[in-house]
Image (cartoon, rainbow, N blue to C red):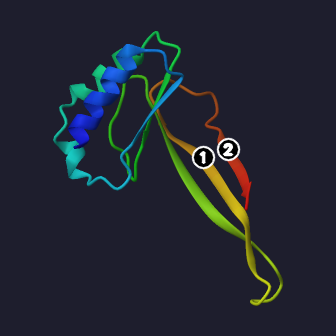
Amino acid sequence: AVTQAVRALDLILRAGGFGVVVLDVAGAPARAFQTLAPATWLRLAHAIAGQPSSALLVGDAPMGRSARGVSVRLTSARCWTGASPQSRRLAGLDIRAHIEQAQRPIAAKPGWTLRAAV
């Protein structure tokens, strides 16, 4: 199924007309990516080159490397309000993005924080 999903992503990228194309493979077993040919990621990079589009691969672990790709790791923490256990409730999430790997040099590896309120 992962192979077919990556092929579909390739076709959509080559068709053009999309600002962002996302392939969510979270929960897929890691061994499913080991069966993909190493040229798969290079082919996807060539498909997106020169297009006004972004391709985003979402997963539980790093899955592939691209000549132009960036790996971003997201972490989150729950934010609670209330002084006692009876009044405690979820106030939001602190979501942080960290650049793990970038093929092109980045002057300073930025980290972003987003506070999402419930």
- Quarter of the view holding residue 91: bottom right
x, y percent for residue 36: 19, 36
Horizontal side, residue 64 vs residue 37: left or right = right
Label 2 residue SS: strand
Label 1 crowd bin: few (<14), some (14–19), many (20+), radius 10 Å: some
Q: Earlier in the sequence, mark 2 or mark 1?
A: 1
Instruction: Name the residue: 18% across, 32% down.
Output: 37
Horizontal side, residue 71 vs residue 74: left or right = left
Split into 4 quadrants, where in the image is the C terminus?
bottom right
Name the residue furthest top.
Answer: 50
x, y percent for residue 29: 26, 54
Name the residue nearer the viewer: 6 or 66. 6
Q: Is residue 83 above or below residue 41?
A: below
Instruction: Name the residue: 34% across, 56% down.
Output: 27
The residue under label 1 is 97
Three-letter code for the amino acid on which mark 2 is drawn: Trp
Split into 4 quadrants, where in the image is the N terminus?
top left
Name the residue furthest right.
Answer: 83
Q: Which mark is residue 112?
A: 2
x, y percent for residue 72: 51, 42
Number of residue marks: 2
Name the residue nearer the viewer: 2 or 111. 2
Task: Kindly indicate whether the residue at mark 1 contacts the one at mark 2 (C-beta within 8 angstroms).
Answer: yes
Instruction: Name the residue: 28% across, 20% down.
Output: 43
What's the CA distance linking mark 2 and mark 1?
5 Å
x, y percent for residue 114: 71, 49
Label 1 residue SS: strand
Three-letter code for the amino acid on which mark 1 is drawn: Ala
